[in-house]
Image (cartoon, rainbow, N blue to C red):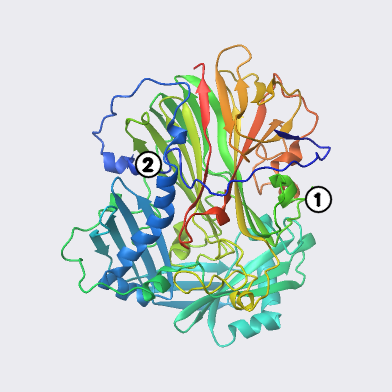
Amino acid sequence: MVAHDNERPSTRAIRRRRFVRTVAAGAGLGAIGGRSAAQRGAGGSDATRSPPAAQSEAAQRADDETAVLYTYRKRRALEVLLSDPEVHAAAADMISSYEAYEPLANRDTVSVQGCPDVEIEGGLEEGRFDVTALERQVAYGHVDRGTDDLVALTITEPQDVAWRAWEATDFESEQLARVLEDSRVQAAVDGADWFPLFTVSEAITSARGIEHGGVNPVVLFVADGDATRAVVAYVDIRDGKVGDVVDVSTVERFAEYPPHELAASLEPAEETVLDAVSGVPFERRPWYTADDGSHRTEDPPQSFDRDDWTIDWEPPGTHGAEITASYRGTPVFERLESPVTFTGYGLPERDGESTLEWFFPDDEPVFSGELLRWDVHSLEFGGPGPLGIVEYDDADDRPSGFRFRSHYETGAQAPDGQDHHSGYRFGQSSHELAYDFWADGVVTPVWKRQGPGFSTEYAAPAVGDADDDEDGATADTDDTDAADVADGEEPEYAVAHHSISAIAMDPVPGTTDSVAVEVVDETGRSAPETEFYLVGTPDTVVRLRNPEGSETIELPLEDGTEVVVARRAAGEIPQQQRLEEPSVESAFYHPAQYIGDEPIQGERVIVWLLREAPTAALPHSTGTTSFVAQSAITLSGY
């Protein structure tokens, strides 16, 4: 156990997982057997449940098999879909593209979408940019997981999809003018059409040694013939003033293996199955895709009872949907939310540090790597928010339950992510936040990242390996040229990308008055008197008890999972909503910064759970992989 307080503790090596268990606790086999409300139908009834158990095995299911589903199978399903000659012809003509994937019971449901051309109108002088993805199409397919046959296929008719990419503000106009004065930018956009991407990044970014809120990565999407690229200009905006462009880089592809480039590497089948198989019904398509580039959503009721749980939720501010939960009529969480996902790029090598020490070695809001976004999960800055409820019937290896599922594309500009889903996804972060509630009293928060954000590679390239992947494609980032690496130039960073998903909870185990806190590890049981930061090891459990009753919330900590327990305080996140108060936002860097000497026993506390998803540990280099982090929360005494 490694405990931390404000005195900057000594570092102890933390054993790291070499293989990330990509999906568990309902994100994998549980999700495969799940049905959305639309799939169940209004007249459906719940299956007979197994007796509740204090410790569920739900959180232990689906290790390696589901890792294969979200890595190898996702890639393979795309290849099968793209090999149909009708799909192949449409994808091969695209200049930007996007893929979506979901595992079903014995099939993969997958889609590819994009456009062969784009129309850009407006400019800096006009104070706006309008973009139209011309003749945008979507191909939906079902792939039999046992035979790799394409067993259902739908291809939409081409349609134009338009969005307003930018509307001027004085501050953004000044930044854009400064970017266009830079000779490096001028050379990159000369003679081509382009449009800018201004995201919420200026408020949630630390980059190139500049602190939180002091730098804005402005992205210019450039349409140049039959290709699309991005130019990223980092503008110094410290003290609310537009300063110099501190760095410029060019990105040639927005994902490691864009679907249209993957199609070009495949030999299409001799005949299409389009007229020989059924279409893909709306409710069996991936959630992230609809014909017009939006999401497939099924609005959850604001309050509902299911599988012994009572759920109330509020629409997202910047912390995702805020959930209040009771189990068997007794309170569990006053609030369950996700105020931040740390999305870091270009990090130094890790040597046993905690996430606080690795990301913020000077205990201040300046990132140790090249770029960090403290991503928010909101409707205003990308949405779309809650997607729907997925129901799970009970089975031999699990009780019944349900998933409350949300998706946030931080930085997307078009309504419901139409720009993101048309392939213009660089500079945006795609986060799925879900909570699995099981009938035996287990809650599993699941985070899934779809990428690519500000990087299109999953591990720092080794010298000489840049051209050696299975398709002969190289992976570009916003600051390392693959050709330079192939020529023997080492990248300056050791870790290309690392994400940390943060869940914050206001626990109320059977009481709304106070909480008793315990830590159980190999040394025994202890009751910390004051706030603490803990890096978990196997067999470490944090317990949150009702001091006057039997109700207990247990947080088993896997090796490396971290927890922060702090007394509730106004002016601190999550009590203070992200972005509402600029001074609070710019000062924020890690939940452990709130650790002090405040007593916690018999008080109301905020508990942060930090789950890591080391992308370099993935078992397959697919380029379309979903990175997943999950954890289990168990109840007893209810």
| Residue that badge 2 annotates | 29
In the rendered image of this protein, does residue 89 appear above or below residue 389? below
**Residue 624 percent location from the top left of the image:** 45, 61
Number of on-image labels: 2
Q: Which class describes the residues within 10 Å of circle 1: few (<14), some (14-19), or many (20+)?
A: few
On screen, residue 44 versus residue 528, left or right, reads left
Q: Visible in this render: residue 296?
A: no
**Residue 50 percent location from the top left of the image:** 34, 23
**Residue 349 percent location from the top left of the image:** 70, 56
Name the element at disc 1. Answer: loop
The span from disc 2 to disc 1 (Cα, nearest Å) is: 42 Å
Q: Earlier in the sequence, mark 2 or mark 1?
A: 2
Choose between 357 and 388: the one closer to the eye. Answer: 357
Choose between 605 and 271: the one closer to the eye. Answer: 271
Query: What's the mark number on residue 362?
Result: 1
Q: Amino acid at mark 1?
A: Asp
**Residue 197 percent location from the top left of the image:** 57, 68
Q: Amino acid at mark 2?
A: Leu
Residue furthest toward the right?
7
Q: Are marks 2 and 1 in contact (CB under 8 Å)?
A: no
Identify the residue at image location x=56%, y=38%: 337
Name the element at disc 2. Answer: helix
Residue furthest toward the top?
548
